[in-house]
Amino acid sequence: MSAAPRIWKASDGATRLLVRAQPGASRAGLAGLWNEHLKVAVRAPADEGRANEELVLTLAGALGLRPKEVRLVRGEKAREKEFEIALEPEELRRRLLERLAEA
């Protein structure tokens, strides 16, 4: 798979990832790509931050990270979100492409 979600190094040195949330899904996990965003399905509804909490847990689990290494930085109440990930951009891209190929 050659397509990948948008990943970049922000001016503060943190690695950023664009995510499209899919709350209320029948199962949680990486769900492919959408307009340079990684689609992530979560079971929790978009209600009082529950979907955001599950997004962090789902991303951390898929990437082999601890939840505190994944942080929502923009889009708290939107489907399109920006996350800070505690990996270098190349390593994040490699792990995501591996997980997407498995899905």
Image (cartoon, rainbow, N blue to C red):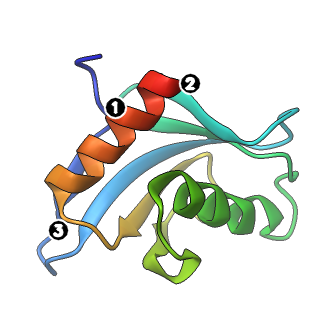
Residue depicted at 82% across the width and 66% down the height: 50
Amino acid type of the residue that numbered disc 1 sits on in the rendered structure: Glu
Q: Quadrant of the C terminus?
A: top right
Give the Cα distance between marks 2 and 3. Answer: 28 Å
Mark 1 and mark 2 in contact (Cβ < 8 Å)? Answer: no
Residue 13 sits above or below residue 62 on the image: below
**Residue 34 visible, this orientation:** no
- Relative to 69, 39 lies left or right: right
| Residue 39 in picture, x, y percent from top left | 54, 35
Distance between mark 2 and mark 1 Cα atoms: 18 Å
Circle 2: is it few (<14), some (14-19), or many (20+) Cα within 10 Å? few
Which marked residue is nearer to the observer: mark 2 or mark 1?
A: 2
Label 3 residue SS: loop
> Which residue appears at 48% of the width and 74% of the height?
71
Q: Quadrant of residue 47?
A: bottom right
Q: Could you classify mark 1 by the number of other residues whose Cα lies within 10 Å: few (under 14), some (14-19), or many (20 or more)? A: some
| Residue on which disc 1 sits | 36
| Dot label at residue 10 | 3
The residue at which mark 2 appears reads as 103
Please tell me which residue is depicted at 78% across the width and 43% down the height of the picture: 23
Amino acid, disc 2: Ala
Secondary structure, mark 2, is loop
Q: Secondary structure at mark 1?
A: loop
- Give the x, y percent position of residue 4: 29, 30
